[in-house]
Image: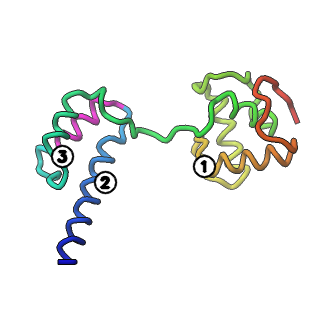
Amino acid sequence: MQGFWNTRLEREKFEFSLIEKALAVADKKEAAQNLKFLVDAGLINQFNAEKIAALAKNPQSLPDFAAPRDMIPPRLGKAVLSRLGTYKGTVDDDSAGSDYRKAIVDFQVGQSLPGDGIIGPLTFDRMKSEYMRATGAWPPEASSKAKP
C-alpha cells in the first residue's frame, strides 16, 4: 500500500513540475499551447486534464509564473541603491530602465550574490542590512535621493 501511494505522489509531483514549466513563459498564448500539448500527449493524467484543457482555451486566465519579480517596488529599490551608491538615476516608479537593473546587478556582484538583476529575498535582505548599516534606519524615505 505504501509503495502505491509513494508512486502516486511522485507522479503528481512530476506532473505538477510539467505544468509549472509550461506556465513559466512570458507569453500566455505559448503557456496555453504548452498545457494543451501536455494534455494531448497524455503526460497529465493525475490532475484533471479536462479542466487544464479548458484553462488553456483562455490564455489570459492562466496564472503568471514567467519570471521572478522584484520583492520591493522600484521607487524603494532605487532609493536604497541610490543611498548605497550604485544607482545614479531618478528615484521613481519606473522599473523598465536599464540603469536600474545595472545598479541591482552591480550591488549583487559587489555583495558576492548572483548578478541576476532581480531583487529577490537574498538581495533584499542584503540591501536592507547595508542600508541600515549606512543610515541606521529602515525603511528609507523614498521621496528623497540621499547620496552617501
- Kind of residue indicated by mark 3: Leu
The earlier-in-sequence mark between 3 and 2 is: 2
- Kind of residue indicated by mark 2: Ser
Horizontal side, residue 66 vs residue 102: left or right:
left
Horizontal side, residue 70 vs residue 128: left or right:
left
Q: Main secondary structure of the magenta part?
A: helix
Q: Which residue is mark 3?
A: 38
Q: Which residue is mark 2?
A: 17
Between the residue at mark 3 and the residue at mark 1, the CA separation in whole angstroms equals 32 Å
Q: Which residue is mark 1?
A: 121
Badge 3 marks a residue whose secondary structure is: helix
Q: Which mark is residue 94?
A: none
Does the magenta run of residues contain 140? Answer: no
| Residue 113, horizontal then vertical, whole percent | 65, 53
Q: Residue at x 75, y 36 (%)?
A: 80
21 vs 58, nearest the viewer = 58
| Residue 126, horizontal then vertical, whole percent | 71, 50
User: Which image quadrant is residue 3 in?
Assistant: bottom left
Judge whether 142 appears above or below 129 on screen.
above
Between the residue at mark 2 and the residue at mark 1, the CA separation in whole angstroms equals 22 Å
Q: Are marks 3 and 2 in contact (CB under 8 Å)?
A: no
**Magenta extent:** 27-37
Judge whether 118 appears above or below 129 on screen.
above
Badge 2 marks a residue whose secondary structure is: helix
**How crowded is the residue under tag 2: few (<14 C-alpha within 10 Å), some, or many (20+)?**
few
